Image (tube, rainbow, N blue to C red):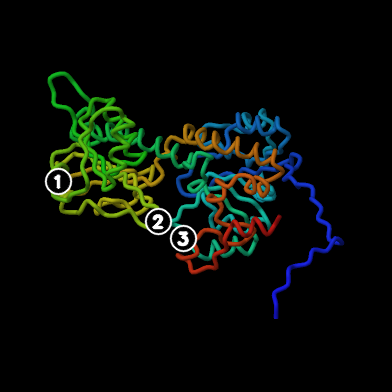
Amino acid sequence: MSQQNPKISTSFSYETLEETLDIKPRMSKLFIGIPKEIAFQENRIALTPDAVSVLVSNGHDVVIEHNAGEAAHFHDKDYSEAGAKIVYNRAEVFKAPLLVKSAPVIEEDLALLQLNQIIISPIHLSILKADLLQKMMDKRITAISFENLKDDSGSYPIVRSMSEIAGSAVMLIASQYLSSFNHGKGVLLGGVSGIAPTKVIIIGAGIVGEYAARTAIALGASVKVFDNNVYRLKRLQNNIGHRLWTSVIEPRMLSKQLKTCEVAVGALGSETGRTPLVVTEEMVSNMRAGSVIIDVSIDRGGCFETSEITSHEHPVFLKYGVIHYCVPNIPSGFARTASQAISNVLMPLLIEAGEEGGFEKLVWHHMHLRGGIYLFKGALTNFYLSQRFDLKYTDLNLLIASQR
């Protein structure tokens, strides 16, 4: 059979269609609830009175529980003057469609949560339980975590701020416990003419390590930094702007340096799971009596074998004559500064959500925010959590696209 040429019918006509643009919706009014935190050692509040004033000026409603900001020295009067409504009934705050918390959702909150609520809060992986997550899924909650919230430059602004506070605070805490009044060695953390500088060892060259090093150098101490990531060590050197003694974590070298130091800071991070244990009990037993260990990574298990969780009320214990400070939530001890740092990130985000027509519209237009969402309308969208608790994982991008 011979091949025929294709016939072109004149009855066929092609027309161009108009291009459809993604029109941004009109502004929507947000109703934001801020409960008082009853979780262990939580003194921070996620929005300051100044931030509330900006939100109210932009047409949003804010309801806040009585004395919610008291621990950070923000009073009810400050919030009511900013335009927030103060309520004395906890359940009343939880009726707000959008909750902003400075502590994770806990068991006591579950009964008060509403269907289809949006919650912005931290998510402490070390204490998270599967049944709590499941109950939030059953209530079709959309949950955004502080720790995974990215800005448009790809960094984690709240984590960074908290790490900066913890790093700077570490040296102030160390200097306090080195004094004779706290049964320390009785040395001044700093440089005095004619006296050898105090020796500080920092394990971990992340943001906490960098800010701890900055503060220690500013005080006049001699600083040595250990980390297994050479890139992080280079970045720390560049950021601080002058040469530092740095090394990869080599046990014999680390042990030798710990024997002669006055302060040892554990600032190793861990993306998932537990922090690696790099300082053994034997290494600690060889340290000088009266020296100070501050384990900042205790909320992820700690990197000193002798570390045990302590509280702001009883922050230290002695082991082998070495003072151990292992308080998990150091920024909460500087609650006002920490609250301002969190508020600086959340307030512009909430304003933008209102302008975009709600949070769902915001995450449609701003891809970088999607990493912070671990529950979307009850579906678990965090792969790590789905693996850990053996729960069904759903891809957030597909979920959002299917809603359009």
Q: Label 3, label 1: how many angstroms apart (C-alpha)? A: 35 Å
Q: Which mark is residue 100?
A: none
Task: Say what amino acid the circle numbered 3 marks.
Answer: Tyr
> In the image, is residue 189 above or below residue 135?
above
Q: Label 2, label 1: how many angstroms apart (C-alpha)? A: 27 Å
Task: Say what amino acid the circle numbered 1 marks.
Answer: Met
* Residue 362 percent across, percent down from the top left: 65, 45
Q: Is residue 105 left or right of residue 140?
A: left
Q: Earlier in the sequence, mark 2 or mark 1?
A: 1
**Dots 2, 3 in contact, CB < 8 A:** yes
Seen from the viewer's position, the closer of residues 225 and 363 is 363
Seen from the viewer's position, the closer of residues 375 and 244 is 244
* Residue 116 percent across, percent down from the top left: 68, 56
Task: Say what amino acid the circle numbered 2 marks.
Answer: Thr
* Residue 371 percent across, percent down from the top left: 53, 51
Seen from the viewer's position, the closer of residues 250 and 124 is 250
Q: Quadrant of residue 86?
A: top right
> In the image, is residue 16 above or below residue 197?
below
Would you name the residue on which mark 2 appears? Answer: 272
Would you name the residue on which mark 1 appears? Answer: 253
The number of discs equals 3
Residue sitting at 49 percent across and 32 percent down?
336
Residue sitting at 24 percent across and 32 percent down?
181
Q: Which mark is residue 384?
A: 3
* Residue 368 percent across, percent down from the top left: 55, 46
Residue sitting at 13 percent across and 39 percent down?
260
Q: Is residue 110 left or right of residue 13?
A: left
Q: Earlier in the sequence, mark 2 or mark 3?
A: 2
